[in-house]
Image (cartoon, rainbow, N blue to C red):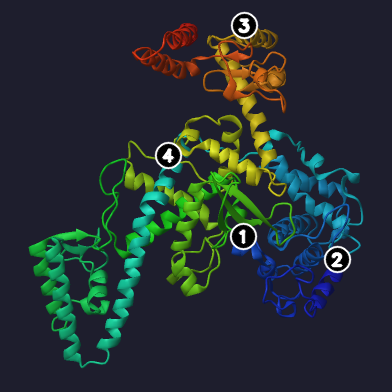
Amino acid sequence: MKAALSSYAAIAVADDRPVLATAPLHAGFDRSSLSRYSDAYWDLGPAVFRENARRSDTRVDVDAVGDPAIAAAIRDYLYVRLNTDLPGYKMRASPVSVRRLFRFALTFFNFVKAECRVCDLHHVDQALLDRFAKFLRAGRRPVIVSQWLGIVFDLYAFRNHLSVAKLSFEPWRGRKPADIAGYRFSVEENRTPRIPEDIIRPLLAWSLKYVTVFAHDILAARNELRTLEDGHRLFVAEDALAPRNARRARRQARLNAYLDERRRQGRGIPVWPVRIGGPASSVEPEPPWNWHLIYLHIGADANLQRPAVGQPNNNMRRTVQAAGRELGTEVGGMDTQISVDPDTGGPWRSRFDVKALAAEERMLQAACYIVCAYLTGMRDSEVQAMRPGCLSVTRSEDGLIDRHRVKSVAYKGKQTRGEEAEWTTIAPVAVAISVLEQLIIRSVERRGTQTLWPVLYVARARKQALATDIVSRLNQFRDHLNERFGTAGEPVIPTGPNGYPWQLTTRQFRRTIAWHIANRPFGTIAGMIQYKHVSVATFEGYAGSSRSGFTAEVETERRLGQMDDILSYFDERQLGAGLAGPAATRIGRSLDSIAAELQPFPGMIADRARLRVLLADTARTLHIGVLADCFFDPATAVCLRHVSSGDKTAPMISLCEPTRCPNACITARHRPAWAGAAENAKAILKEKKLTELQRLAVGGDLRRIEKILSYSKVVSG
């Protein structure tokens, strides 16, 4: 078999088949000019449509394997997976997934070589596969092991299409990869962490502030810099036609005029916030003059600021030094006015320079991503597929509401090209998209980019779109907020539960908003962004679409949230917390009976898995509320008496009457809302214009509230 593989490798050198024989291609690509089967590496980029794909995921370096037999087997396997459908088993692999298949195949073939001293699949038997499965289980979760085992099953399933890399026997006698890996799917399998509320709340608040307040200054500063650069090019072009002495005189005159204008405005000479390069000096250090900005104004070449004796810029340097002694310095130095931070009453930063502007543009891009990803529920691939002009605004049928709609591409579960989809969203997202369309103008002009998420550093950009670099950008934004607006003792974005900065990923935003919509529609996040509008818009546009699958995710998060909440009820009950409200006796008795069945030690849970099973029925009825939680029973729900028809499978939280409904349960968590209601009632009763009937009604409400407060005082005590 070794000889067979070697000869196959020799034949493969002359194989001229196009690798992308069947995959859809981007416009403008000729299939015949793309990577061939025998090429040293395969470039699959022309068939990769996802904007967030890594560049490395679009290339396969086959010859880097080293062993010709393994390289030949990998070529054989990847080509078949790319171009062959096997109905009932697997359809052809998408080009963006081939890099992952390459890793799986390389791992298996290397294992075979280590076991048999040669990559010879005729030597593979079930015992070797058992050892391979054991090797994979070391340090990997079952779900991951199940994925890696797929290569073994593929080599048998596609045996009639493979030339070399095929198995002649059915692995594990037809059992599934998940069975071999010990993987059991459950709705709790989603391991993407939710962003904690004390982190997402300030993160979203600062992102909104960047988009709605700071963006104006950042975009204005970029326009100012563009104007300066255009003027600088014009000065240089004009000076190039003049004699040398005339050029010097013109620059000196423009410098004097620039300094006179600074003097008239009462502003200092521009300096960098810290010294940028330059040799150390034993004498009193010169301020780090922002020569870049000064030369933009006067049309000079930055190289003229070298301090060699006799160079023509010595006069400029002495002029600037004298002006600096007279006027002082100003960090940044650009003219764009800095807006007032509404929370502090002062400017949100010092004036811009070119480096600060570039940094703030990147932070603004990250803020826009957070607003778009979190407030739409879109996946990263869908957010990064957005294009300029993707936003449309229409009026509702009654003419009262603006409908903000975003067009993009949904990829999950779709063909390689994806499918165009539309999301209904809210005004902050529309503002963020408008900001992005202005932010990318320079990238569009210089590189012709078509995405809303280009790499903004135009001069050194190695690729056009951010793609996976957005993760680094998000965490840089977190650090930037803490460094600029927080302190070491009080960061504006708190640390995670482990005491370290929370590591943001793109998947976390979708899961977090799904959880909040499902479980905390009236929480603190809701108040700051009119969460009801987010929920309505999300369900109306995105969640209601069969393309998205978001409804199912929200329902999954609802079930998980209900279980988390009932577990909190149980734990607090074991620690001595009481309950109030009409449902208190029923729920307390149920929790106590479960505790007795489990017989835990005081304050501890003996068997968490069994506890979840015992609490499952109660959890399904639990709906969290502001004034009370509802353990919903449609037969006794007071809120449903106000509903003549329609869906009666869930409570009408807005119609809840916590003091009357037998489903209402009140805990210490609800006490602040009741206390606020009592204060409002007392304030109303002080009004002299109340009628006697109004006074009686408000007084009755106050007595019921105070009764609840007396209960909850005992509960919290």
Mark 3 surroundings within 10 Å by alpha-carbon count, few (fewer than 14), some (14 through 19), many (20 or more)? some
Judge depth for marks 2 and 4 and give the one in front: 4
Q: Mark 2 — residue?
A: 164
Determine the CA span between mark 4 and mark 3.
39 Å
At a point 80% along the width and 73% down the height, the residue shown is: 9
Determine the CA span between mark 1 and mark 3.
55 Å
Q: In this picture, is 250 found above or below 211?
A: below
Determine the CA span between mark 1 and mark 4.
29 Å
Q: Mark 4 — residue?
A: 202
Quadrant (top left, top right, bottom left, bottom right) of the N terminus: bottom right
Residue 329 in view of the camera: yes
Determine whether the residue tagged by mark 2 lies in a helix, strand or loop: loop
Determine whether the residue tagged by mark 4 lies in a helix, strand or loop: helix
Q: Which mark is residue 585?
A: 3
Mark 4 surroundings within 10 Å by alpha-carbon count, few (fewer than 14), some (14 through 19), many (20 or more)? some
Earlier in the chain: of badge 3 and badge 2, it is 2
Earlier in the chain: of badge 4 and badge 3, it is 4
Determine the CA span between mark 2 and mark 4.
57 Å
Judge depth for marks 1 and 4 and give the one in front: 4
Judge depth for marks 2 and 1 and give the one in front: 1
* Direction from residue 55 to residue 492 in the image, left or right: left
In front of the other: 2 or 136: 136
> Callout 1, which amino acid?
Ala
> Callout 3, which amino acid?
Thr
Earlier in the chain: of badge 2 and badge 4, it is 2
> Callout 4, which amino acid?
Pro
Judge depth for marks 3 and 2 and give the one in front: 3
Q: Mark 1 — residue?
A: 53
Labelled pair 3, 2 in contact (Cβ < 8 Å): no
Determine whether the residue tagged by mark 3 lies in a helix, strand or loop: helix
